[in-house]
Image (spheres, coloured by chain):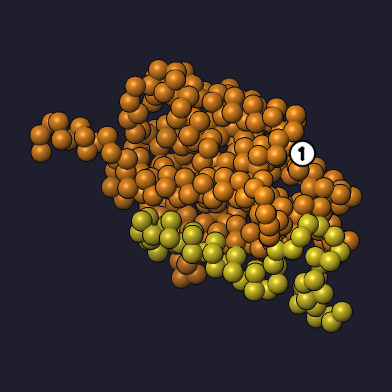
Amino acid sequence: MKINERLFPTIIIVTFVLFLLIALLLGFRPGHGGGPSSAAPAPFMLSWLGGVVL
Amino acid sequence: MTARTKTKAQKKPTPLMTIRHRIQAFAVLATFLLGLRHVLPGKASTGGSFDAFCPFGGIETLLPYLFRGETLKTTNLLNFAILFGVLGVSLVAGRAFCGWLCPLGALQEKLARLARKLSGEKRHIRGKKSAARFPMRLPKRVDKWARYIKYLLLGIILWVSVTAVYPPLHFLCPVRAVFSFQMTGLLWSVLITFVVTSLLVERFWCKYLCPLGAALAIFNKIAPLRLRVDDHKCVDCGRCDVECPMDIADAHANSRDLECIQCLECLETCALKDTVTLEMITIQAPHDA
């Protein structure tokens, strides 16, 4: 299916923002530096991937 | 239209590339402000360190996060969110992030343009080989093998990251060297190397060293939004080869090349109507894949 090339910038920017928002909504939010305290979504990720609730 | 107004019209950058350059300028400005924000006094650490906004930081800290349950120092979960955004773009349009949104790629293109001006190009004519000496192309054989360095670097960084405390690229990152304003001796040498190599070879970092580009390259093979060249219409004039910032040999025949950054320069340069087009591969048309 042919796409108008003028739409390309809009497509990539909208996709970037959309995926960024999804990630933020999933809990990948800014913290302060590294360390174990920033590992909050790990159990969610693992349970989502393996069906195991940690 | 008089000859004079026609010349003026030809001088104007084509609309799509103007949009691309504006988006790139915005990406550079945003990264510059982000770097500035982290050296200004006050609550500068909201959102984490400068590294926390880097999509490649998400790759660097992925294995430590999965194996040890913690992110590397100077990175945090925001890295994953930004990486997720970049992966989203790559899933749809291959390495379009490199061609449209990467601030480092944008700077390299600006530096290449500066090099062309400094080395004798008076006026750039789209599709015509420049008389300027720089930026030059490395010999084909060297170029071919040097492009594998970035994949090797990506492998080493992933390997080292498992036991690392800081992101492996933290002390050598060119984005930090250009934008972070927190310079060390090592970062100064990275900055000088970055500027000099970008003046000598267009998108030197992207072609040979960028590990993020290496990680995104595979998406060029699976992304549904891609360039398509009509072989029946293409006359093999080589205009697209001249404009390709990644110096892909026979760009018209290699629109799915791992090196392609989907900048659409070839599409804009092609003088034959509907020869290079943008297409979305659909399930209904598997023969297009």
Residue extending furthest toward the left:
B2
Which residue: 60% across, 65% down?
A: A20
* Residue in the picture at 84% in, 80% down: A52
The one of B173 and B276 positioned closer to us in this rendering: B173
Does residue B267 show up? no
Q: Chain of mark 1?
A: B
* Image quarter of residue A22: bottom right
> Residue at coordinates 77% horizontally, 52% vertically from top-left?
B74
Residue B86 horizontal side relative to residue B80, left or right: left
Residue B175 is situated, as x and y percent measured from the top left of the image, at 64, 41
Residue B138 in view: yes
Judging by colour alone, the chain drawn in orange in this rendered image is: B
Residue B232 picture location, percent across and down: 34, 46
Q: Quadrant of residue B211?
A: top right
Q: Nearer the viewer, residue B124 or B50?
A: B50
Q: Residues within 10 Å of mark 1 (few under 14, many from 20)?
A: some
Position of B100 with respect to B79 (left or right) is left
Query: What is the x, y in percent for residue B289?
Result: 51, 58
**Residue B280, above or below B27:** below
The three-letter amino acid code for the residue at tag 1 is: Phe
Task: Look at the image and tell me in which quarter the N terminus of chain B lies.
Answer: top left
Determine which residue is flagged by label 1. Answer: B171
> What is the number of callouts on the image?
1
Instruction: Relative to B124, say whether B182 is above or below.
Output: below
Q: Residue at x 32, y 48 (%)?
A: B15
Chain A painted colour: yellow
**Residue B162 image position (x, y, % from top left):** 86, 52
Secondary structure type for disc 1: loop
Towards the viewer: B159 or B116: B116
